[in-house]
């Protein structure tokens, strides 16, 4: 058994005899009240979603899941298709890709990890760091070197994030997929 605050997005818990995948887990501690964890859950068997609040020390039973390496193949509206080394295809709904949607783009070669419950793919995890190209960003302002200056950049798939002021259109950048933050510029 694990406490509610130990669960992260993508993990699965046995709640009332059903497997529920945690799509979002937000820890909250206010001054007088007990610490709580707000969770967005999706039932793996029925597909029903719910949001609930647990005390941080509530016990939940984790479910161990199978994992397999896959790569993104193509988008077949409304499903995203991933393929493993043996050319088996796995279709995943957009809701199950909530944390990684900003980094999925056509032609990506990153090796991802598909998480299975039985025969069904419930989520996909990206590598810790990925490299993406900047499609558009404003030019840097000359002379603005006082500290860590950031600006907004748009990636090829339309996602936006904050990058260093010296980054330009066409540059490749390294992104931490756990936080969605820019790490560094990469030589192509």
Image (cartoon, grey):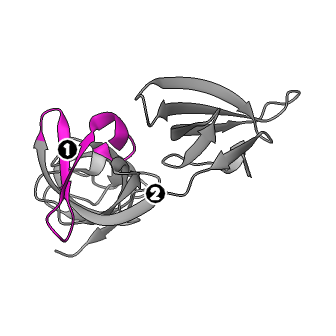
Closer to us: 144 or 99: 99
- The label shown at residue 145 is none
Q: Is residue 98 above or below residue 83?
A: above
State the separation of the CA atoms marked 2 and 1: 37 Å
Give the residue at x 43% y 61%.
66
Q: Is residue 169 magenta?
A: no
Closer to us: 130 or 46: 46
Give the residue at x 15% y 49%.
156
Q: Is residue 71 above or below residue 155?
A: below
Q: Which residues are magenta?
A: 76-101
Q: Return the residue at label 1.
A: 80
In the visual, does 36 lie left or right of 176?
right
Residue 144 can be seen in this image:
no
Q: Position of residue 153 (x, y in %)?
A: 26, 47
Give the residue at x 33% y 56%.
143
Give the residue at x 42% y 28%.
46
Residue 48 lies in what quarter of the image? top left
């Amino acid at each position: 058994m694990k406490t509610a605050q130990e669960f992260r997005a993508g993990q699965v818990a046995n709640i009332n005899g059903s497997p529920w995948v945690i799509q979002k887990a937000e820890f909250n501690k206010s001054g007088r009240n007990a610490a709580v964890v707000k969770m967005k859950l999706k039932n793996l068997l029925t597909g029903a979603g719910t949001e609930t609040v647990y005390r941080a020390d509530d016990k939940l039973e984790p479910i161990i899941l199978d994992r397999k390496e896959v790569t993104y193949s193509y988008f077949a509206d409304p499903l995203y298709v991933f393929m493993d080394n043996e050319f088996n295809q796995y279709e995943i709904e957009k809701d199950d890709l909530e944390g990684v949607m900003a980094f999925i783009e056509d032609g990506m070669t990153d090796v991802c990890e598909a998480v299975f419950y039985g025969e069904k793919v419930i989520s996909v995890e990206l590598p810790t760091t990925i490299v993406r190209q900047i499609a558009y960003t404003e030019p840097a302002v000359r002379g603005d070197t006082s500290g860590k200056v950031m600006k907004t950049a748009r990636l090829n798939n339309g996602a936006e994030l904050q990058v260093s002021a010296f980054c330009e259109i066409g540059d490749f950048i390294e992104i931490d997929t756990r936080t969605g933050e820019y790490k560094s510029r990469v030589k192509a």
